[in-house]
Image (tube, grey):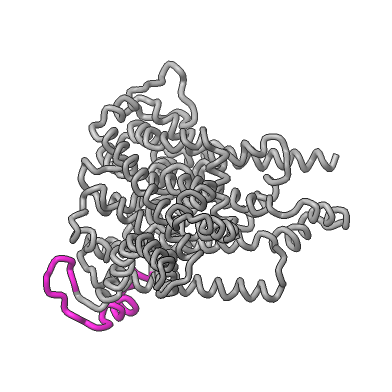
């Protein structure tokens, strides 16, 4: 070994040792422990942790309707956010066309993303509250008082109400990301398309959307992850209530572990969740790479 | 005529969006200026000037743990982001510029760590943190943010791959050591990425409630978000008091946003748009 490669090794070792130890201790080991715990019956305290095979998984799949309800609630967030994406894209196109004040609008709609979720959740608890709530006030003023419902205590609508809060919080973020993508579309291409007589929809479909594929990928990833991990909004606004109707995966898992001291069962939930997120990401990668191959490279 | 209609449409859309954002915020603001306990039949959007009171604010500001939680938040942000930046840039540099044994293994582990949702791993991480005696200390969130919040790797690798390798090589011919190449040539060139990361991470750490809530139940270790939760819990029935609390806690990030609005928006967007 010559002096040069020794120095190189020294550099690599010194640089990587701390990050790798941190990774091993706080990510890899807990991850392994999570999988292991999912096969145990454990209350988080006892020194004996009996191995019970797949019993936790069996219980989840066959005897836990609450678990599946929580999962379905996460899908509600995903569905609503997914449906909003095309609208957010259109709004981004509108705000991207230069007009006076467009930057101000952009700054305002991004504001909710900067505020902490705890504060937002409390504000909206007030907004939707049956007593003095701003939303009911608005409906009454608009002559729609008959539509008033128990927004946060009716199990049929509570998840949609919570999803709308999530939309309020992230819409500006999504629009700004779309705008950043749209800004990277070369102007001469757009001008040429206009000269060729392409209308707004055609420009969007054949030039802008293919050009911002990276942004769309990122946002899908973010929306899927965010929806499956939804925690603070439902936790603060309803604590998963009424009666578990607005529980989400994260709330249910954390409650199972820390409130009901069933770490084994909670771990098996976590494993299923992680498996799902990884699977979704792989499917997404596969699909986007196929689309790319099919259409060639636009961007 | 046609052009005018389109422009009017744009302004209508803009107006709608602005109202949508401000409506709930305005209600919170108006409520925070109201006498606590006054039963309201009046508009949640308006308060006559002679009825405005700042007593709710003085109430929040007098809270014993407000300053403590602000300082805690600040400490957590500064320490964890500093380490995130230094370790992240160094790791990305090693992974991008060098070939070595176990590189693939290390790379895959980091990649998996970026993919796995952090929220849910806490069930298992909890034991590790408690075992190290970090439970109920601000060391817990700091160490978790440093170890498991890894988006910097992705962004730094992108950036480093754009820096010509001839720069490293010529520095090496001049007799520069690896640490000097990194600290004096590469790291300064990463400044835009670093700025983006500082912004994005500050916002996300200040606003995170999950980790502090889980690991630091102690009053002395509150952060701004868990302070607000405790404050709200104690004032269940008084919206004006709670509203003032919400605004005081949100103020630091809102002020940051007002001053650095352009950089924040660009920084956050850049993180996502980079191919």
**Quadrant position of the C terminus of chain A in the picture:** bottom right
Residue positioned most to the left:
A47
Q: Is residue A157 visible?
A: no
B201 to the left or right of A42:
right
Per the image, is A48 magenta?
yes
Where is A133 relative to B112, above or below?
A: above
Q: In front here: B262 or A83?
A: B262
- The image position of residue A48, as x and y in percent, is 12, 74
- The image position of residue A213, as x and y in percent, is 64, 63
Residue at 34 percent across and 43 percent down: it is: B225
Q: In front here: B209 or B271?
A: B271
Residue at 49 percent across and 27 percent down: it is: B46
Residue at 50 percent across and 64 percent down: it is: B96
Residue B109 found in image quarter: bottom left
Per the image, is B165 magenta?
no
- The image position of residue B7, as x and y in percent, is 76, 40
Stretch in magenta: A42-68
Residue at 72 percent across and 72 percent down: it is: A295
Where is A73 relative to B75, above or below?
A: below
Residue B41 found in image quarter: top left
Where is B249 relative to A230, above or below?
A: above
Q: In front here: A149 or B55?
A: B55
- The image position of residue A136, as x and y in percent, is 47, 41
**Quadrant position of the N terminus of chain A in the picture:** bottom left
A144 to the left or right of B214:
right
Residue B218 found in image quarter: top left
A24 to the left or right of B173:
left
């Amino acid at each position: 070994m010559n002096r040069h490669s020794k120095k190189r090794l020294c550099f690599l070792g010194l640089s990587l040792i701390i990050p790798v130890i941190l990774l091993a201790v706080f990510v890899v080991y807990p991850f392994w422990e999570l999988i292991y715990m999912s096969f145990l019956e454990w209350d988080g305290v006892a020194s004996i942790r009996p191995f019970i095979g797949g019993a936790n998984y069996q219980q989840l799949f066959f005897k836990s309707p609450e678990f599946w309800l929580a999962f379905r609630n996460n899908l509600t967030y995903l569905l609503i956010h997914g449906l909003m994406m095309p609208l957010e894209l259109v709004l981004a196109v509108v705000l991207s066309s230069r007009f006076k004040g467009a930057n101000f609008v952009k700054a305002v709609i991004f504001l909710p993303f900067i505020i902490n979720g705890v504060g937002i959740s409390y504000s909206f608890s007030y907004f939707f509250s049956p007593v003095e709530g701003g939303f009911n006030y608005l409906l009454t003023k608009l002559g729609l008082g008959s539509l008033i419902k128990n927004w946060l205590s009716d199990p049929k609508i509570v998840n949609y109400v919570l999803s709308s809060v999530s939309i309020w919080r992230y819409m500006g973020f999504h629009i700004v990301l779309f705008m950043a993508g749209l800004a990277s579309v070369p102007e001469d291409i757009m001008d040429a398309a206009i000269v060729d007589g392409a209308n707004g929809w055609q420009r969007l479909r054949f030039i802008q959307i293919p050009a911002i594929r990276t942004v769309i990928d990122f946002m899908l990833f973010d929306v899927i992850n965010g929806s499956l991990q939804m925690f603070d909004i439902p936790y603060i606004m309803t604590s998963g209530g009424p009666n578990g109707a607005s529980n989400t995966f994260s709330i249910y898992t954390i409650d199972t572990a820390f409130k009901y001291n069933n770490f084994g069962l909670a771990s098996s939930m976590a494993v299923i969740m992680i498996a799902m997120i990884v699977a979704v990401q792989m499917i997404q990668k596969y699909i986007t790479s196929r689309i790319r191959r099919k259409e060639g490279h636009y961007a | 005529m046609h052009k005018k209609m389109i422009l009017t449409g744009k302004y209508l859309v803009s107006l709608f969006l602005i109202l949508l954002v401000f409506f709930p915020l305005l209600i919170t603001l108006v409520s925070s200026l109201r006498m606590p306990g006054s039963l309201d039949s009046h508009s949640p959007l308006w308060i006559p000037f002679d009825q405005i009171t700042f007593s709710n604010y003085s109430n929040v500001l007098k809270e014993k743990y407000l300053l403590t939680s602000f300082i805690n938040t600040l400490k957590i942000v500064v320490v964890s982001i500093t380490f995130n930046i230094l370790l992240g840039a160094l790791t990305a540099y090693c992974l991008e510029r060098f070939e070595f044994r176990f590189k693939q293994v290390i790379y895959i582990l980091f990649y998996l760590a970026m993919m796995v949702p952090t929220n849910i791993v806490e069930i298992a991480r909890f034991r590790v943190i408690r075992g190290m005696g970090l439970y109920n200390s601000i060391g817990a969130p700091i160490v978790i943010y440093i170890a498991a919040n890894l988006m910097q790797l992705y962004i730094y690798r992108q950036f480093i791959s754009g820096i010509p390798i001839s720069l490293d090589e010529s520095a090496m011919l001049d007799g520069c050591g690896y640490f000097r190449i990194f600290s004096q040539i590469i790291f300064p060139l990463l400044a835009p990425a670093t700025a983006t990361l500082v912004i994005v991470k500050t916002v996300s750490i200040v606003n995170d409630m999950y980790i502090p809530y889980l690991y630091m139940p102690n009053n002395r270790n509150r952060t701004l978000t868990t302070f607000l939760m405790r404050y709200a819990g104690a004032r269940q029935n008084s919206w004006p008091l709670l509203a003032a609390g919400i605004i005081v806690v949100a103020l630091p990030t809102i002020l940051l946003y007002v001053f650095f609005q352009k950089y924040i928006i660009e920084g956050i967007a850049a993180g996502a748009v980079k191919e």
